[in-house]
Image: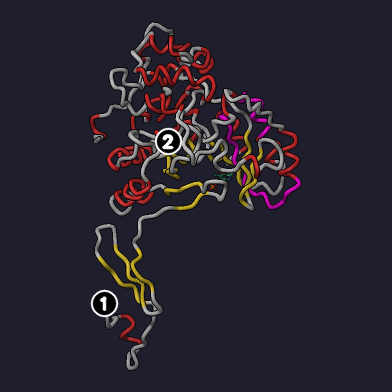
Amino acid sequence: MSYHEDRAAWFEGQGLWQHIPEADWRDWTWQLQHRLTTAAQLEQYMTLTPEEKAGCEFASHKLSLAITPYFFNLIDRDDPDCPIRKQVIPRAGEMQLSAEEMLDSLGEDEHSPVPGLVHRYPDRVLFLVTDRCAAYCRYCTRSRLVSNAQHYDFHPSYEKSLEYIAAHPEVRDVLISGGDPLLLSDNKLDHLLGRLRAIPHVEFIRIGSRIPVFLPQRITPALCEVFRKHGPIWMSIHVNHPKEATRELKDACERLSFAGVPLGNQSVLLRGINDDADVMKALVHRLLRMRVRPYYIYQMDLITGGAHFKADVRQGIEIIRALRGHTTGYAVPQYVIDAPGGGGKVPINPEYLEKITDEEVIFRNYEGRRFSYPLKSTPVPDATSADIARPVGGGLER
Ligand SMILES: *Cc1c(COP(=O)(O)O)cnc(C)c1O
């Protein structure tokens, strides 16, 4: 697999939906109402593989099928290996359970003092405000509850969560997620953000959302005004492949940025989708051009029926090695494994450090060249103050 950034246009327009009035196309409620949610609807536009047909049938028991028309346009309907297609169209692999997989692979439910609030790290909480999304990622880490296909019956109590946060002064950071929080109405978000802002010890508020990617039409001026009003609100979006970086996404990111929302990106490393250094490099470059700072690359969580997405961790490490030093430092995300059972995110890095003793650190740079950084200082006995300005060893000549 190789991916050449130059050849990929910034897709824009209505694609298969040319016949729809532009005002409808740009209306996020139209996009939601016209989502493709059954195999039969998909087959109006494309031929599903037998694998996909089986996956679609199973989806209603695992994680609902839903794709916005906007995002469906990004699928290459002639290519069963299309990296967009594999993210949102179910495949038979979802029916295959592996021994190491878990429904709640990050132990979130155990760390929930009230339903919908996960308090794993000392100073921050994850606040799940809905179980619905604009479209469903087949590898969803929260597929046990998201879309309610498994009858989890997620009923978050905003009041109880707000009470908990207010009663815990150590919570300085609230991450609003779900499901997708941007499916809430502007009024609800305005209210929720206002309530959080009113808690004096909550100093950092961020939102995790894939709506800019699935439904950029949702990023309206009115929504941006809510963020500006309660700002700074930070946001992590979720882009996995450069093909998702469309004109529409770029414009949505611009609207958010101009409303004062700093943007980060979280990708999941997915086998046959983005577990490739060329693809990731093209992606992170596009993100920077959209004012988005690559934040995390996640190793796939051990969710049930997720094995067909699992990439090799060694490949993940090689991707980071291919980025660090070879491109802009801002473009290099942190690769992490979220510890199974609930230990939090742990950085997984290429090894640059070779040896560390009391005397020196031995390490390699991005080209593989070896360096030493001395830890001991050896004073030069007879040096005068003039020598300081013209250092004796290794300094710049003036
Ligand atoms: C990811 C996560 C956070 C936020 O972690 P950061 O490293 O600060 O981005 C907080 N709580 C939970 C439960 C999480 O999974």
Q: Secondary structure at mark 1?
A: loop
Quadrant location of the N terminus in the rendered image: top left
Earlier in the chain: of badge 2 and badge 1, it is 2
Tell me how far mark 2 sits from mark 1, CA to CA: 53 Å
* Within-10-Å neighbours for mark 1: few <14, some 14–19, many 20+: few
Q: Residue sitting at 36 percent across and 46 percent down?
A: 316
Q: Residue sitting at 32 percent across and 66 percent down?
A: 363
The x and y percentages for residue 370 are: 26, 67
Query: Considering depth in this image, is 205 or 124 the residue closer to the camera?
Result: 124
The x and y percentages for residue 198 are: 72, 41
Query: Considering depth in this image, is 106 or 363 the residue closer to the camera?
Result: 106
Q: Quadrant of residue 163?
A: top right
Q: Does residue 252 appear in this view?
A: no
Q: Quadrant of residue 392?
A: bottom left
Residue carrying label 2: 307
Q: Which residues are magenta?
A: 167-192
Q: Secondary structure at mark 2?
A: helix
Left or right placement of residue 298 versus residue 382 in this view: right
Left or right placement of residue 348 versus residue 190 in this view: left
Q: Does residue 169 appear in this view?
A: yes
Q: Residue sitting at 47 percent across and 17 percent down?
A: 57
- Figure quadrant, ligand 1: top right
The x and y percentages for residue 111 are: 65, 44
Q: What amino acid type should be assigned to the residue bearing mark 1?
A: Gly
Mark number, residue 38: none
Q: What amino acid type should be assigned to the residue bearing mark 2?
A: Ala
Query: Considering depth in this image, is 60 or 365 the residue closer to the camera?
Result: 60
Residue carrying label 1: 394
Question: Can you name the residue that lies furthest to the bottom here?
Answer: 382
